[in-house]
Image: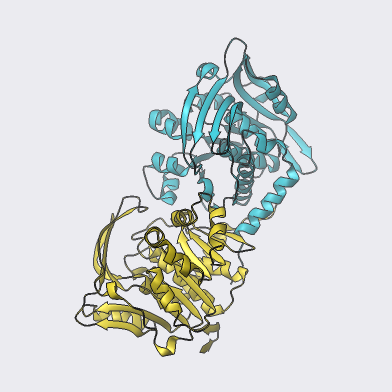
Chain colours: A cyan, B yellow
Amino acid sequence: MYVFTHQGVNVSLLVVGSVALDTVETPFGRVKDALGGSAVYISTAASFFTTPIRLVGVVGGDFPKEYFSFLESRQIDLDGLRVIQDGRTFRWSGRYHYDLNNRDTLLTELNVFSSFEPQIPDGYKRSLYVCLGNIHPNLQRRVLAQISKPRLVVGDTMNYWIETTPQELRQTLELLDVLILNDSEVRLLAKEPNLVRAAKVIRSMGPRVIIIKKGEHGALLVTEDTIFSAPAYPLENIYDPTGAGDSFAGGFIGWLAKTDDVSDGNLKRAVIYGSALASFCVERFSVDGLRELSYLKIQDRYRSFMELSRFDER
Amino acid sequence: MYVFTHQGVNVSLLVVGSVALDTVETPFGRVKDALGGSAVYISTAASFFTTPIRLVGVVGGDFPKEYFSFLESRQIDLDGLRVIQDGRTFRWSGRYHYDLNNRDTLLTELNVFSSFEPQIPDGYKRSLYVCLGNIHPNLQRRVLAQISKPRLVVGDTMNYWIETTPQELRQTLELLDVLILNDSEVRLLAKEPNLVRAAKVIRSMGPRVIIIKKGEHGALLVTEDTIFSAPAYPLENIYDPTGAGDSFAGGFIGWLAKTDDVSDGNLKRAVIYGSALASFCVERFSVDGLRELSYLKIQDRYRSFMELSRFDER
């Protein structure tokens, strides 16, 4: 299914991941049961580029009405969001340290997410772009088994799956086009301290594109022919890093789905859009940094990224 | 004194710092009593842009002839290199860990460096560009007291001086135009975890330009009007990180002295040249990565840096 707009081609985008209620403490404040989860951040960030977004996830009967409304206001299609009325929504709680680079997980209550089995609605099975949030690699694979010929599959993972389900993860990696992970996860997965070499090792496991998120140091894109170093936006006020990585993934795949162009040059632009969305995300708690956002503001920040990294030829 | 070449204006460049014999162990090998020290790396790196370089430092009678010859071959003027015949040269020894991001200092033998009192030869006192290697802030200030109206003063420092001589360092900072330091030192000096804010705090202490070295993550340039994020060159083979920071400083000030242009646009180029020289330095032990270098190879790497960070407008 194609939707044409004046700004370009929009192709169907499916997002699968967690929908959560987050309780977060940073040096700047605290929020309780705020809207969170990988599928929420990815979908919200992507919704600035292409709509509707097809979200697949699960919540309990306690999931607040206003959060449904928010997701709908972003034109996120909730046909694939299962509501288990007598269950409780996945809850996560964490506390960030003074420098915001480290955090302690205080609580992880899987609740309805513990038996999450992604059912892809029939209407979603021909989605061309698929973004798999950070869930069990077997679940990621079971999602893909339901999709017919996706054009691009982007997957996220984390140290927990690398350490506890290495074989399952390896099988999933064979099915991904793009793997997004952070620098310590790259080293852990490749068993190689040099990032460039580690990215090559991981490319040999399946994904033709590796994106290494480095937090305040930006991101690296590694393909067969290209290495691209994207700066981080130099924010003076970071309130809550929660969701930054998922907002990155959402901005990244949102731009690709909007333009339906997976050339190296466009992957670079997508990394900058991802970085832009992450930078907006961390300026507020929960999804609040994305609430008042507009496509124009995103374009402005894209230009700031150009300014930030541009230097002239000698 | 101006030296004109076909490539631009070359102005006089004075470098003051340590000249050392380094014993270094990395996972890839070991060198004993190799040529090292901040003044050596800075001068050697800068010598690809402008010559002669005026080096001020001190060595003992044990300083090998071949090292004098190497420095002379790079057109480094040694009138200011004092030789204390019955003394021993400064020695440093360190061991790098598996990931090369951390090292243990095994030995620091100051020897003749412990009573180093920089005497600037009369012919050097009108040097227009001055680079102060990482030495005691009081020594850095006593160098500057001997220089008449420098056009640009670049200084390096380290956590040791920030922690043990904070007041002396603050006095020196008032005299610097450019301060180069790494990200953890920026946070330590400014007492502020956010790098952008920390750079602003340090600018208020004196230097109008702050350069934050982030190792494998590149460098940030912060001036009144500009923040510039330079990528690191994605090296697959790093043999010895020793001297990377000083090679950066040498490439940076070498380019500025060559072009005699301290505009924001040219400072950005200088950061890239500094990053290029650092990338060559770490590809071999000691100064060997700079030995076989040429201006053409440096220009090639400059272009690689453009490739690495360039993305197109939407």
Q: Quadrant of residue A250?
A: top right
| Foreground of the two, A262 or A17 | A17
| Foreground of the two, B270 or B163 | B163
Identified at 62% across, 69% down, the residue is: B265
Looking at the picture, how far across and down is residue B300, in whole percent?
Answer: 50, 69
Q: Decide: is B118 above or below A108.
A: below
Q: Is residue B123 visible?
A: yes
| Foreground of the two, A52 or B156 | B156
Tally the numbered discs: 0
Image side of residue A214 versus residue A121, left or right: left
Q: Quadrant of residue A43?
A: top right
Looking at the picture, how far across and down is residue B263, in whole percent?
Answer: 62, 72
Identified at 78% across, 38% down, the residue is: A4
| Foreground of the two, A239 or B50 | A239
Q: Decide: is B85 above or below A208.
A: below
Identified at 57% across, 69% down, the residue is: B267
The residue sitting at the front extreme is B167
Looking at the picture, how far across and down is residue B153, in whole percent?
Answer: 50, 74
The residue sitting at the left extreme is B86
Looking at the picture, how far across and down is residue A233, in whole percent?
Answer: 60, 50
Identified at 56% across, 25% down, the residue is: A143
Q: Is residue A129 visible?
A: no
The residue sitting at the top extreme is A86
Image side of residue A145 versus residue B119, left or right: right
